Amino acid sequence: MFALQFDQLDRQAELRANPSELRELAQQKNSLILPVYHQKLLSGDNGLIWLSWNNLQNKVSTVQDKHLIYIGKVTIEGRPQHYFSYRLTKPEEFIQAFPEAGLKGLRELFPDLNETQSYLANVAIGIEHWHNTHQFCGYCGHATYSKLAGFVRQCSNPNCAKEHFPRTDAAVICAISFQDKILLGRQASWPEKRYSVIAGFVEPGESLEQAVAREADEEVGLEVTNIQYFSSQPWPFPQSLMTGFTADATHSNIRLKDQELEHADWFSRQQLIDLIANGELILPYRYSISRALVENWRSQ
Ligand SMILES: [Zn+2]
């Protein structure tokens, strides 16, 4: 099990249509609200800063219900805890109100967050990003507004009134092996010496398996067979769902066809051990599905 697979969140979708009940829930003393701004979360030295509604209202003059998003309920030792996020429109007010706090991105926060916190942060960031990028109706261009606790945006043009729902972009990630070696590559923009398995977005009309086969061909010029589903992971950078696969290459001749990778090669288990020990290769972040795929291959 790796991070972001936390499954104890009860999203209580039926509550989203009941704004007065949600408002009451938000105002309960033990309900927690996480401010978000442009995919960054309010946080301090000890991780995320969750606020009560009172705290939020007392400190920030422009707080409005319409920016509140209901994430859901987590029950810990029989006690329900309700979580909300709050979409900031003027972050400077918050920074002024909470001088000990700053806005941090998930990559920076991940190492310090437990499973529950990283999962909730992921939901908060994914939906905030969707709101930011769907302020206007894609059909008619009029402004949209948030409803159903932040899970729908509706077009304000009465002749259109189209409802828009949060988007998730499907992506595939695949550990390709050939005999006793795994294929790892790196993009030029990654931190130095970081290597990972190949990944890419699913195109319209494509199955996940077809996307794996196409990415293998485009990125490294490989034909793959025996494509098997491994697991999935929400990947909030900004709104993807990574679906993980394993596959076998039919030959080992790597060609970087689309130049997405600056380097790719085959690595044996022993080579990986040596390169990592010498600091010459860094594997993906330990909570990522890419790392889980590499570890899965190493353990076989
Ligand atoms: Zn419209």
Image (cartoon, rainbow, N blue to C red):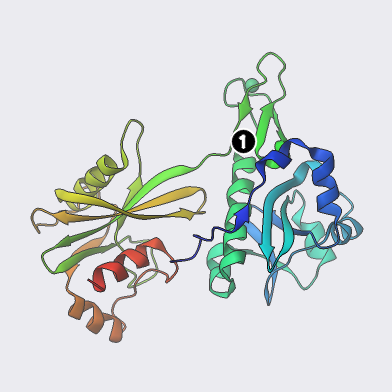
Instruction: List x then y, in percent, for residue 16.
Output: 72, 40
Q: Is residue 104 left or right of residue 156?
A: left
Instruction: List x then y, in percent, for residue 200.
Output: 34, 48
Specify the quadrant that holds the C terminus. Answer: bottom left
Instruction: List x then y, in percent, for residue 119.
Output: 57, 60
Q: Which residue is mark 1?
A: 134
Q: Residues within 10 Å of mark 1 (few under 14, many from 20)?
A: many
Q: Residue at x 72, y 53 (%)?
A: 84
Q: Residue furthest top?
A: 159
Q: Is residue 233 left or right of residue 56?
A: left
* Ligand 1 picture quarter: top right
Residue 258, placed above or below residue 83: above
Q: Residue at x 91, y 59 (%)?
A: 58
- Residues 130 and 25: in front is 25
Q: Secondary structure at mark 1?
A: loop
Which of the 4 quarters of the picture holds residue 294? bottom left
Specify the quadrant that holds the N terminus. Answer: bottom left
Q: Residue at x 77, y 73 (%)?
A: 100
Residue 106, placed above or below residue 18: below
Q: Is residue 205 left or right of residue 66?
A: left
Whether residue 28 can be seen here: yes
Give the residue type that dot 1 points to: His
Residue 38, placed above or below residue 180: above
